[in-house]
Image (cartoon, grey):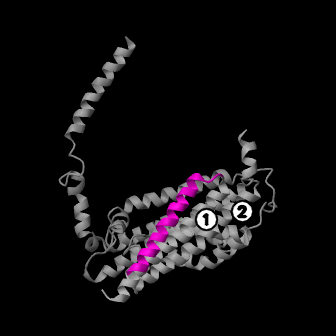
Amino acid sequence: MTPADAVIGALTVVFAGLGAFFFLVGTLGLLRLPDFFSRTHAATKCDTVGAGSLLLALALYNGLDADSLKIIAIAGLVLLTSPTSGHALARAAFRTGLVPWRKERAGEEAS
Amino acid sequence: MKRALVAALLIVAAIPLLSIVAELPPHAAPDSPAYTHVSAHYLEHGAEEAGAENIVTDVILNYRGFDTNGEVTVIFTALAAVLAILLLPSEERVEERPAPAMPVSMVVRFVVRLLAPFIALFAVYVIMNGHVTPGGGFQGGTILGALVIALTIVLGEDEAHRLLPRPARPWLQAAAPLTFVVIGIAGIAVVGSYLGFPAEEPWQWVRTAWLVILEIGIGVGGGAIIGTLFWTMEAER
């Protein structure tokens, strides 16, 4: 194994671990956060940072060829579309009158 | 008394059913009829007999093309039924549509405009490459339909309606069944049977061309039908 291979292998592990971490955090947020807005926020983190890191790790692992270019293109597509759909969802919810959750109001609503 | 009778009838009905289940070949047994009749033949000879490297395309367009012909006709009939119900002339229909309650977000508009050419390219690729890789007319047509819906939301209805000129619309909506009929009749003329594909040595390119034409017909028809359904239901809102 040449030093270059070792560096690429280490970067692959780092990015794959980062992606897995963000998917874990995003899933926890989707399950545990209090309202629609914060859950949307958590779920879109999975797609952008999580999937982005994982795809980057795959491209690094695969080396420099046409398949890696396709993987990078998919990552670019995900980076464009996922925040857009998250934005559209949150905007539609806010404009149709969904009130964001606030900590100080949490008690009143429950009672 | 009644309950006992019902129980007895159930047992009488259950005995033959259970005995038949016991006769069935075990799950996933390699010698079960499902794996020994046509499937094995399709997998071994499909590419050379039917003309497409994608076995699914071989089955739906060549071996069972007649079935797919009926299928696309059913889809077109479903569109006709929906239009017949939703386009009933009503007295209270207002000519001017109210402005949408919420303007389209700048972000959404920018991203859809940026990605629309790529989505269209992907749809064409899925349709045209369906005889080689997974995909084909049905899948590509759905992508086209989704593109029509996204563009309608972003550009507004009037602008989007200009993408599909009104006189061409019925032909586009009926594209799939029409293509099947045309290729089917061409099969009668050339091979002697409806939806027959020429398979002899120098004419294999004709077979490939016909498969691609069928895929295009299915794709265009499917996209036009999905788009029209969306427009009709939006106008109904």
Quadrant in the rendering for residue B49 = bottom left
Question: Which part of the image, by quadrant, shows the C terminus of chain A?
Answer: top right
Picture coordinates of residue B237, whole percent (x, y)? 72, 54
Q: Which mark is residue B12?
A: none
Task: Kindly identify which residue carries mark 1.
Answer: B227
Chain where mark 2 sits: A
SS label for mark 1: helix
| Subunit that carries the residue with mark 1 | B
Q: Residue at x 34, y 81 (%)?
A: B205
Q: Residue at x 62, y 60 (%)?
A: A40
Q: Nearer the viewer, residue B9 or B165?
A: B9
Residue B73 part of the magenta segment? no
> Which callout, 1 or 2, points to the residue nearer the camera?
2
Q: Nearer the viewer, residue B113 or B69?
A: B113
Asked whether A25 falls inside the magenta stretch, the response is yes
Q: Residue at x 40, y 83 (%)?
A: A8
Residue B126 in sight in this render: no
In-image side of B34 versus A89 (left or right): left
Q: Is residue A34 left or right of residue B43?
A: right
Q: CA distance from mark 1 to mark 2?
A: 25 Å
Residue type of the residue flagged with mark 2: Arg
**Is residue A79 found left or right of B34 in the rendered image?**
right
Q: Secondary structure at mark 2?
A: helix
- From the top left corner, tell me how far across and down residue A3 is, in percent: 35, 88
Query: Which quarter of the rendering shows the N terminus of chain A?
Result: bottom left
Q: How many marks?
A: 2
Q: Do labels 1 and 2 touch, CB within 8 Å?
A: no
In magenta, the rendered stretch is: A9-34
Mark 2 sits on what residue? A91
| Residue type, label 1 | Gly
In the rendered image, the vertical position of residue A65 relative to residue A13, given as above or below? below
